[in-house]
Image (tube, rainbow, N blue to C red):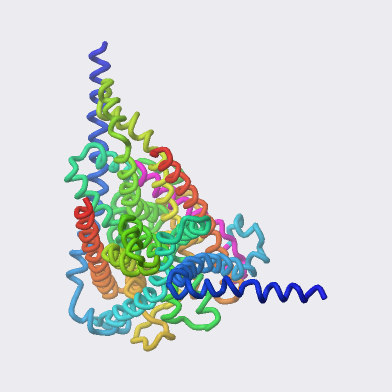
Amino acid sequence: MAATPTTVTTSAGPARPAQGYWQRLRGGDEAAYLITFMAAASILAITGLLVLELYANSSTSRGKFGWSFLITSTWDPVNDQFGALPFIYGTVVTSFLALLMGIPLGVGAAIFLAELAPPKISDGLTFLIELLAAVPSVIYGLLGVFVLIPILREIEPYLKAAFGWTPFFSGPFYGVSLFSAGVVLAVMIIPFIISISREVIMSVPGDQREAALALGATRWETTWDIVVPYAKKGIMGSIFLALARSLGETMAVTMVVGNDPKIKASLLAPGYSIAAVIANEFTEATGQLYTSALIELGLVLFALTIVINGMARLMIIGADKYKA
Amino acid sequence: MTNLHTLRRKTVNVVMLTVTGLCTLFAAGTLVYILGYLFVHGATSLSWDFFTKLPTPVGESGGGMANAIVGSGKLLLLASLFGIPIGFLGGVYLAEFGGNTFSYIIRYVTDLLNGVPSIVIGIFAYTLIVLPQKHFSTLAGGLALGVMMIPIAVRSTEEFLRAIPNSLREGAMALGASKAKAILTVIIPAAKNGIMTGIMLNVARVAGETAPLLFTSFGNRYWSSGWEQPISALPVMIFTYAIAPYEDWHKQAWAAGFVLLSLVLTVNIIARAILSNKKHVAR
């Protein structure tokens, strides 16, 4: 009884709109909308599926180890014991080293290119530097192995002489190490920091500089006390983007980090990173738990980069608002 | 007193300005040095065999990477077929139909996807294709690279469509064209150069990706026929050969690095020339 009126309304209801819909579809507008909408929606679906696949395929490992996966440091495929801490440590330390070297050099160069260099030289150098951002990471790895590591072997005695009293620069040096990975990452992220920071600094309004100079500030005081604080949010954004990139960097790190899942204080000792262990062991992983643990590492890396990228976005959007 | 103060400020000025100059010199110098090294070392390791022969077994010298060059081509073709249509149409949606909450979400998710490390995309393609099929394949590698192409295709398409002045859209509609017709026959052709350049840059970027291929297309020392077999790619060969302990393989790795980098940089330089030309015209 109750079902009859419902059926009537649904069958009669859409009849008229359906005709209009058909006509609009023939006109092309609705079809164009539908096709492009579906493409856009499929991006959403693909990303959703990616998260789902990572989550579902790491269930064995998540079920067995729980949260302790993140804080235990035994990585023993033979006895099915998996802890992610050495990889998280290596990822964080190499990225931190990269930022430590990359930020001063990158921001310094960005200041020079935006504020001081003649426009022609600045444009030329920036073109070159931005081109370097397009170099594939495996090429940086290749150069790391055959160019950087021999150079580091040369300067390692001096590093030890200067900092050998700290635990960070003690112990033997084999060439492949957390430090080497940090240097390669620094070289890789410097172009990013320079090109974004330069844009941000150049978009600081000219009257800010003129006002400071008119008050008698020197060129450096104008740059450091007025222009850089004005562009601070954008520069921070560029640094976070660089950080996200170095956290997820796989090939260059895999080739120079040494691939040893131990936590050691010395930066000269070989280490490992999340991306590197996935790259090295995924095809060799036997057994469901092993593969599942590696996929869980992927999930950790995913979460880490999402958070950092989100922060970078917030900062760059904030900088835009400030500008407007 | 005042003089001393001024002197200090002036010294700081000169010193700090010099320091930033040195930063630039150091950054640019390091980068130029390593690339120069690659070009010199790579060009001398290159021979005609590299382009025409298969890799030789360990211990035998000579050989080339013909299969890897073709393999990279096949993978990029698959990736483009998958990634570009979705990215392009998604970009058209955002530029021409967007403006609501849904397009905000799409933009956000696209950025998110762009930030996902390439190795994680590799895991995704692995779970999606390799795991159910139980073997590595060209298809899985192509899918991984295709997913990586989507976000940049969306963003560049949207950007270039948005750069088209609204008067063109209004003009087309005033002449009686439907919105679809205006997009198809007026707006997209006007943005064609930019969009094509964006696609070129996108392909060049993905051509150097190694991590997502390691456990999807895996690698192959022979020719790979069809789309179901493992296949070798130039960047993966560079990785394998660079970490191997054989002198002869290192030479091949340099040659492969040289070829890959030449391709990537050439595309980038051409694309930049096209884009900067367009800017001048617009002004």
> Is B104 situated left or right of A97 in this image?
right
Q: Identify the magenta region.
A: A75-104
A84 magenta-colored: yes
> Can residue B231 be seen here?
yes
Residue drawn at (34%, 51%) of the image: A192
Q: Position of residue A78 (x, y in %)?
A: 59, 72
Pick the front one: B79 or B238 = B79
Pick the front one: A30 or B8 = A30
Above or below, B273 relative to B217:
above
Q: Position of residue B44 (x, y in %)?
A: 17, 70
Q: Position of residue A311 (x, y in %)?
A: 49, 47
A99 magenta-colored: yes
Residue drawn at (64%, 64%) of the image: A62
Chief SS of the magenta region: helix
Pick the front one: A83 or A103 = A103
Residue drawn at (34%, 74%) of the image: B237
Quarter of the image that includes the N terminus of chain A: bottom right
Q: Quadrant of residue B159?
A: bottom left
Q: Quadrant of residue B176?
A: bottom left
Give the residue at the far top of this rendering.
B1
